[in-house]
Amino acid sequence: MKKFLIYLLVGIMLLSTLSVLVGCEEEESPVIDNEDDDEVVADDYGFPDIERKDYSDEFNFYVGPSNGGVRLWYMDSDLNRGSAMDEAVYQRQERVRRYLGVEFVNVTYPDVYYNTYHTNIQSAVQNMDGTVDALVTHVHGSVSNLISENLIMDFNELQGIDLDKEYWHKDFMDTLELNGNYFLGHSDYNIMMTYILGFNKELLDQYGGALEKSIYDMVREGDWTLNTLMELSKLVAIDVTGNGKSDDDYFGFTAAPFIKFNGFLTSCDIPMVAQTESGAYEVALTRSEYFAKADSLVEFFRELGNANYTHFIYPAGGGEPSVPLSSGRTLISVLDTINMENLLNYDLEFGVLPYPLYDKNQYDPESDTYGYKMLQWGGYLAVLSYMKDPVLTGETLEMLAYYSENVKITYYEKVLGKRVADMPDDAAMFDIIWNSLSTDMGQTFYNLGGDETGVCYVLPQLMNPEATQNLSSFLKKKESAINLGFKKFLDNID
């Protein structure tokens, strides 16, 4: 990952040079590699220990809903729109096809949702029909069913996969390890389900001129904390017409506090569920070492939500803030990487930041991430407990992971090259973000007998102006059922 920044900056320089030579800003689609270029990035990671072969077989995979869209994972003529990102995904696919002789088949299940597709996987395993080899899961609902019903395999049992390679995110996978099993994989193949903070550079320059240091130096020196977020938000509060309405006002911080606010628990190092000394998994928010931080985090956002320099919208099912960063009327907003390219359609100079630390005590100057932790919200890889050829599946996933670096770089260069990557600081922020992906058991495993969803979304529920409960009473009603559900869940896993 450390080389990502170097590649990114070199790519930016090359793109800048080309734009000068041709005198336009038209995006050039990358050329598909030649047949003999299979080891073109071998010096970067070390080529996988997999020999070239011709399976002359299919690799069948299913992409569950809410995983960044199938176009990231599969590319055919119907999906390919000729963009740089489409071509990069196609190139990855073609490299693996040429190297292993596998044809990619995108399995579709009509009328399924993020938490209902597991019955289709169940049928594929029980019938042993080989119709699915691997899948891309969302975090909700079905993941715990897949594991407890023995429908997916431990990655350790797959031949051809080397989880110690840099393109596999082993540290992230460790956060979801169950009794020595890695049921969920994560690699450079997964780039779209991370939430970040974006900021309007022009508004910051206009109203933040008195800052003692740049916002990027704040991140690097551990000063990018919740309090800093609040202080920066106060810089922009403009009632344009003086009518007290938000339809034309400017704000310091805007957001739709639902899914994306889970990331503040992660960034503040507050797990929803964590292990006890005995090894059991229990709700962690009620523990003394986490409760005070979680309670103060709720109060922090209640204060923000009542401030005239923020504008939060509380939709029942998520959605985008009514004054997004693209409006040019907000200084800081929560973004997701999958939709960042939409910002290119606006005349907006924006930068990117990790979620803030709880306080300076989290800062680690010796770490390449400085102590920041970013929530990764899905897009996990899983392999079925029955597949027609486990070796083919393992080797295909290994080669996809290896060749995915270019997809990741292409995506960030495509987005950054227009608005962000003209400044190396923003590329450095993405490097911090990508290397600090994290999660916890409670964020991922659901349907265990208690109201895990309620606890997972504790921030948006309790910071809502209509909320009447405090954190203690809120958790008291949910804790025992969740703890019992996790015990039963883990008792079924060897």
Image (cartoon, grey):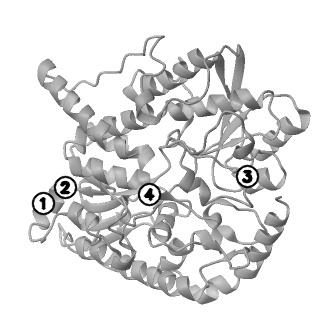
Judged from the image, the secondary structure of the residue bearing numbered disc 4 is loop
Going from the N terminus, do you reach mark 3 or mark 1 first?
3
Mark 4 closeness class: few <14, some 14–19, many ≥20 residues within 10 Å: many
Residue for badge 4? 436
* Residue nearer the viewer, 236 or 144: 144
**Circles 3 and 2 in contact, beta carbons < 8 Å:** no
Residue type beneath disc 3? Ser
View extreme (top): residue: 35
Image quadrant of residue 205?
A: bottom left
Residue type beneath disc 2? Lys
* Residue nearer the viewer, 85 or 468: 85
Indicate the position of residue 188 as horizontal and vertical percent values: 50, 40
Question: Residue at left 60%, top 72%?
Answer: 272
CA distance for labels 3 and 4: 26 Å
State whether residue 469 appears in this view. Answer: no
Going from the N terminus, do you reach mark 3 or mark 2 first?
3
**Circles 4 and 1 in contact, beta carbons < 8 Å:** no
Query: Could you tell whether 367 is left or right of 183 in the image?
Result: left
Indicate the position of residue 142 as horizontal and vertical percent values: 73, 52
Question: Residue at left 24%, top 34%?
Answer: 10
Going from the N terminus, do you reach mark 3 or mark 4 first?
3
Judged from the image, the secondary structure of the residue bearing numbered disc 1 is helix
- Residue 142's tag is 3
Indicate the position of residue 376 as horizontal and vertical percent values: 52, 55
Judged from the image, the secondary structure of the residue bearing numbered disc 2 is helix
Residue type beneath disc 4? Ser
